[in-house]
Image (cartoon, helix red, strand yellow):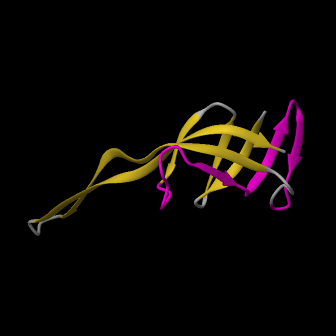
Amino acid sequence: MYAIVEINGQQFKVEQGKKMFVHHIKNAESGATVEFERVLLVDADGTVTVGTPTVEGAKVVCEIVSPLVKGEKVLIFHKKRRKGHRKLNGHRQQFTEVNIKEIVA
């Protein structure tokens, strides 16, 4: 059984028992339970239910494993030719690690 769920404006394919990284969830604490109700599609053993735009009564229950995880460093390099202009910026994206406990269809 799997579902397509929208979390913080992004769509993820989730399965029960899997761990995944989503964009940082504010005010999240380790061990807390979070429910996502914007379920767009549910596949229950070959029976596919597509929402318009969401599936009525469906939700995904997750447990927060780690509220703040930093991703890989991303470097942004700007250069203008023949001007001697160079600028290097970088950042590390913040994620939240969640464990999918249950998919309610």
Q: Is residue 40 left or right of residue 73?
A: right
Determine which quarter of the picture holds residue 13: top right
Outermost residue on the left side: it is: 84
Q: In the depicted view, which residue is nearer to us: 25 or 72? A: 25
Image quarter where the C terminus lies is top right
Q: Is residue 101 left or right of residue 20?
A: right
Q: In the depicted view, which residue is nearer to us: 77 or 67? A: 67
The mark tally for this picture is: 0
Q: Position of residue 10 (x, y in %)?
A: 60, 55
Q: Position of residue 29 (x, y in %)?
A: 48, 51
Outermost residue on the bottom side: it is: 83
Q: Position of residue 36 (x, y in %)?
A: 68, 54
Name the residue located 49 percent from the left edge and 55 percent from the top edge: 28
Outermost residue on the right side: it is: 47
Against 12, is 38 above or below?
Answer: below
Q: Position of residue 81 (x, y in %)?
A: 17, 64
Q: In the depicted view, which residue is nearer to us: 15 or 80? A: 15
Image quarter where the N terminus lies is top right
Name the residue located 73 percent from the left edge and 56 percent from the top edge: 37
Name the residue located 81 percent from the left edge and 59 percent from the top edge: 54
Which residues are the magenta region? 24-53
Name the residue located 11 percent from the left edge and 69 percent from the top edge: 83
Q: In the depicted view, which residue is nearer to us: 10 or 57? A: 57
Against 10, is 69 above or below?
Answer: above
Q: Is residue 79 magenta?
A: no
Q: Is residue 87 left or right of residue 56?
A: left
